Image (tube, rainbow, N blue to C red):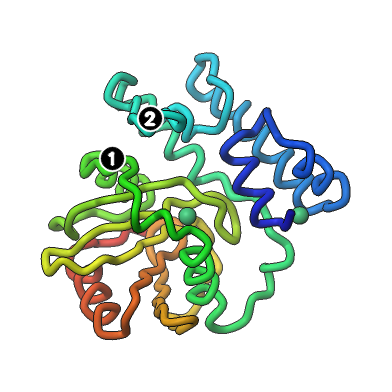
Amino acid sequence: MNCLEFRRLKLAEPRGLPHDALAHMSECATCRNFAAEINDNEERLAAALDVPVPEGLAERIILRRKTGTPVFAKASPRLWAMAATVVLTFAFGFQQWRDAGSQEYARLAIEHVMHEPESFTTARLADPQLFHTVMQNFGGEMQASLGKVRYMKLCPVPEGTGWHIVFETEQGELATLILIPAKRMTSQSEQATVGGWTALARPGGQGYYAVITSSPDTLDKVDELVRQRVRWRS
Ligand SMILES: [Zn+2]
Ligand SMILES: [Zn+2]
């Protein structure tokens, strides 16, 4: 088990870690800290909402993982909007990526996408309203639709938890958008190409966002689209 796998498991099953995950945690201080902060975050969430939080992170409130059926339709909008905010504003440190050099943001975004191929084949939280709220909580005012949302997931990202979104543009092109709550990006943009994927990271909202596509042409178009249709508060 590596650190990335551990983080995925911990986010998905915070209280029910399998044996190999517990073994990894006992040997890895970074993941021990990560686990402790996830547990803290759940407690913060419970306190903020003043309701007992079901087992799991905020995402558990937003969706029902096992069935893939969104439960947010049943929960009050306030509840899940708040859950999303708490999770997004809470950043836990990820020491080994702290000193990431140039192009790391874009490259890490590509690696993230490569580790999650199901994001292109699975429909998950494909809800325009939820997308709108998540963007707003992150500091992005949507001026117009980016396209059809197909997949949304809270994922471990370099400095915390961020939303991983896959959408289809009006031209039928697939694009990934990752919202990362970290305040450290100083350049205007960073670009990377790895294994046929190309990504562009830009500062925006509570941190930065990365757009990832499978071709440089599409990247240019989607980057333009996001810049035209989202106004970022900072
Ligand atoms: Zn680890
Ligand atoms: Zn992801």
- Residue 123 position within the rendered picture, expressed as x and y whole percent measured from the top left: 31, 46
Residue type, numbered disc 1: Leu
Position of 103 relative to 67 (above/below): below
Outermost residue toward the right in this view: 27
- Residue 90 position within the rendered picture, expressed as x and y whole percent measured from the top left: 56, 44
Quadrant of res 197? bottom left
Q: Depth check: 46 or 218 in front?
A: 218
Quadrant of res 11? top right
The local crowd at label 1, few if under 14, some if 14 to 19, many if 20 or more residues have their Cα within 10 Å, is many
Quarter of the picture containing the N terminus is bottom right
Give the labeled residue for mark 2: 80
- Does the numbered disc 1 mark a residue whose Cβ is under 8 Å from ligand 2? no
Q: Are marks 2 and 1 in contact (CB under 8 Å)?
A: yes
Residue type, numbered disc 2: Trp
- Residue 211 position within the rendered picture, expressed as x and y whole percent measured from the top left: 36, 69
- The disc placed on residue 130 is 1
> Which numbered disc, 2 or 1, marks the residue that appears first in the sequence?
2
Quick check: 74 left or right of 25?
left
- Does the numbered disc 2 mark a residue whose Cβ is under 8 Å from ligand 2? no
- Residue 174 position within the rendered picture, expressed as x and y whole percent measured from the top left: 26, 66
The local crowd at label 2, few if under 14, some if 14 to 19, many if 20 or more residues have their Cα within 10 Å, is many
The secondary element bearing badge 2 is classed as helix
Quick check: 197 left or right of 24?
left
**Residue drawn at x 83%, y 52% as measured from the top left:** 29
**Residue drawn at x 44%, y 65% as measured from the top left:** 208
Quadrant of res 158? bottom right
Position of 71 relative to 198 (above/below): above
The secondary element bearing badge 1 is classed as helix
Outermost residue toward the top in this view: 51
